[in-house]
Amino acid sequence: MRRTIHFTLNGEKVSTEIAAHQNLVEVLQQRFDLFGARESCAQGLCGCCTVLVEGTAVSGCLYLAAFVEGKAVVTVEHLADGGKLSPLQQAFLDCGATQCGFCTPGFVMMASQLLEQNPDPNEDEIRHYLSGNLCRCGAYPEIIAAVKLAASKARTART
Amino acid sequence: MATRKAPKMMESRQVGRSVLRLEGEAKVTGRAEYVHNIRLPGMLYGKIFRSTVAHGRITNLDVSAAQAVEGVHRVVTINDIRTIIPNPFYGPAFHDQPILASEKVHYVGEPVAVVLASDPHVADAAAQLIVADYEELPAVFDEVEAMTSRAIVHDVLKPAGTFPDLKHLQGKSNTNIALDFHLRRGDTEAGFAAADHVFEHTFRTQTVLHLPLEPFVSIGDATPGGLTIHTASQSPSFVRIEIARLLGWSENKVRVKVPHLGGGFGAKLYIKMEALVAALSLLVQRPVKISLTMEEQFYTLTKHATTFRIKSGVKDGRITARACDVYWNGGAYADIGPRITQKSGFTAPGPYDIENVSIDSYSLYTNLPPAGALRGFGIPQLVWAYESHTDMMARALKLDPIEFRRTNLLREGRPQATGTLMQDAAIETVLDRLALRTNWKAPFERGAGSVKRGRGVAMGFKASISPTTSIAIVNVAADGSVTLYCSTVDMGQGSDTANAQLVAEVLNIPAESVCVVHPDTDVTPYDMATLGSRSMYHMGNAVKLAAEDARNKIEALARELGLPEGSNVPVAELFQKKYKMQAGNIIGTGSYIPNYVPPDKDGLTPNATPFWMVGAAGAEVEVDTETGHVRVTKLVNIADVGRPINPRIVETQLSSAAVMQFGFTMQEKMEFDSGQVTNASLADYKIPSILDIPFVMHNEAVEAEQQSGPFGAKGVGESGTFAVSPAIANAIEDAVGVRLTSLPLTAEQVYRALCAARGEPLEE
């Protein structure tokens, strides 16, 4: 059963043919060559597949592609503006918060949403907000430091 | 007045600088290339049908229903594989693992058949229609039982022939022992007889999983007259040689390419699915990709469960004799288990100066998924036992645990059990810093009410796997820009960046300007593998030599052009002068293999390892006596790291190794029922999340000069794992007076021990 869906992908109106059983990660990879969201556990438990749908982070491995009809989807590839890293991406680099890099886009997406909702999170809030993302390399202390750094730089910029 | 280096000089130094990861930008933008990104024209997807019994003879395999599904290209069994590879058995130590099950299955989850289709969902659905019948055979799961069990996993042993200490096992039958390593130093029996106290304990570790977030993935691509394999592998050179051997081809017909790895930790070593995708692609003459699911990782490679019986004699506070019996649960195929049994086995007595030592270390086949190296190459299992044991002895003798260790420490220049000297490892400093960073001498708050507090320490050490070879090529282009070709796999440890720093230091250019070519066996030269913290040392030496060779050739070119010594003409101008335009290359090469002396019949050798690694940990815990729940409030990691090439990456390596071992200590365990893994998913097998890790972690790299290392460096990827588990168990006993002897240290285990200690044991 194939059908065509229309949605906004990283700010651009797009349409593509999908099968009913296909999840969002599969469609992003196969139809749009976007590999930043990636499937790992396939149970919505690791966060490697995190993308934003209508501004809210979802697990792309559990999200049927058919459900994005008419909606806006943002992936990690959209965060860097014209090749310039977002402040959070830069903070991940500066703090050594990426090792193998497989989980990194998921963490970056989730932490971006955190900073949007709470520009000045404390360590407890960071840990709780990011508890649905796993990093097997164990770069958690560096990830926490990166989120703090991005927040403090934004704070300095505001004042 | 203190002198300060001028900032400009500091900036010009490439080694010892926290250069940001070269590939960092590609990773934070989601654009880094992994094998999972790769799609080739006409590519088929393979889905594996797996065994449901732990040990059995295949009496019937019916693939007809799967073959009949619309969209299925082909269903493949071992009979098809044999048309391509007549003797389809592989492995680094034993040629024991079939590409698909042949006649028998040896564990639950073993690959039996593969369905190929253009749509992976079709392949998946069709694989479920395959039917296999088995005549079940007796199975053995426990490593100690495997020593004497009537259930024999393999009818005949088939050592690969690459390791001399396995040759005596050729053709042996009626045994599950895949390697028995023995070491005898002095006279342990006399030592025990003369001792004031003799202690004997048994410790166990559980089966755990590497669980890289990028599951195993490989693509085979048959090309006219050859074969390309794109694979998430830590050992591209080994894959090439082994595939060439299986096919009876020359090495240069097999090309192995490895982009970024989404984690490895020892899982992606040697051959995993590469032989399978190679055979499939040659069979159907199309590219074939197999991407395992998270669940399938649990059926592919695990970390050895172990049983370690350790016995020590102590006289006047000194350990005078130690006997070690270690049993390694290798699962159904040997993988690298026999090497772990020996190369790590010889460190089983710990980092102590002991006159009389015996070691008996056994690699055992069982009917569980195969076990291999996992971040530490067997060392964390050994340290768990000998450092729990050390603490129990200190406690019984009423000696301070740090002082007891200090008294017995294997100091610089003293022979380890093999006879090889402890050298260039800051072992005493590590212990001193451990005492300092844990505030060991300060009074310690013991907690109040039902929550008790305790603290513990532990330290371990490791030899490097020897002898192994690394080759590197440094290419200077006509504009003076530099490219490094080496087959070290950067799976997150930062080797690309560190190797670029070595090249940059020698050639006096910024590390950020060096291009590091990812492993591609048509392009990058041989490297044994990325494992065992060997790359910084072995490949580091090769890279440094290659860069020096290039520098020498640049200087020779300047001389050839008649330029005076030290004229410092830019490289680009040299090329311009020589070739009259922007043209040409200078190629520097370097190869490195350390000296090594194989052990004699008593397991003794004056040169067992080119360098030693030392790692120590200190833990503070809170134990809730009403629930058994343990909270690690502080974890201190100290390791000797030689001279850090990139201090930030070194620190993250220490920290993240400790986080990984923390999971193996507190929560992770593969559960089995008749050989079937019953928690094969992230829902049931919990790895540490950001909420689980200790709130305070202190990591400290103790600098030392590894004289034979590149700019004094040594490996650091594993040192943070060594001592975490016993440090926490020792802290738990310190808090509540109960001793746990098997991992993981769950609330249930602690609570049961507390109940048993007050004479009210719970039912199982």
Image (spheres, helix red, strand yellow):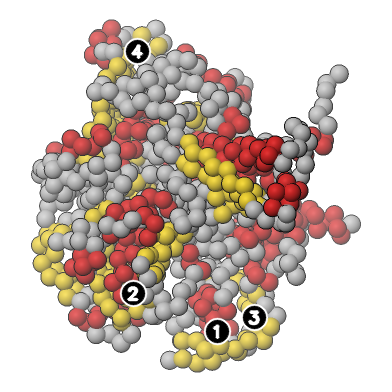
**Residue in the picture at 16% in, 49% down:** B154
The numbered dot on residue B285 is 2
Gap between marks 2 and 4 measured at Cα: 62 Å
Residue where numbered disc 3 is placed: A9
Asked if the residue under mark 2 is in contact with the one under mark 1, i.e. CB atoms within 8 Å, the reply is: no
Which residue is nearer to you in this view: B85 or B614?
A: B85
Residue A151 x/y as whole percent: 76, 56
Residue B312 x/y as whole percent: 32, 19
**Residue in the picture at 52% in, 48% down:** B486
The numbered dot on residue A67 is 1
Q: Same subunit under labels 2 and 3?
A: no
The quarter in which the N terminus of chain A is drawn is: bottom left
Asked if the residue under mark 1 is in contact with the one under mark 3, i.e. CB atoms within 8 Å, the reply is: no
In the visual, does B560 lie left or right of B610?
Answer: right
Q: Same subunit under labels 1 and 2?
A: no
Say if B620 sits above or below A7 in the image.
above
Name the kind of residue labelled 3 in the image.
Answer: Leu
**Residue in the picture at 25% in, 75% down:** B75
Label 2 or label 4, whichever comes before in sequence order: 2
Q: Nearer the viewer, mark 3 or mark 1?
A: 3
Gap between marks 1 and 2 measured at Cα: 38 Å
To which chain does the residue with label 3 belong?
A: A
Residue where numbered disc 4 is placed: B355
The numbered dot on residue B684 is none
To which chain does the residue with label 2 belong?
A: B
In the visual, does B631 lie left or right of A120?
Answer: left
Label 1: how many residues lie within 10 Å, few (<14), some (14-19) or many (20+)? Answer: some
Q: Secondary structure at mark 3?
A: strand
Q: Secondary structure at mark 4?
A: loop
Determine if residue A131 is in view: no
Gap between marks 1 and 4 measured at Cα: 71 Å
To which chain does the residue with label 4 belong?
A: B
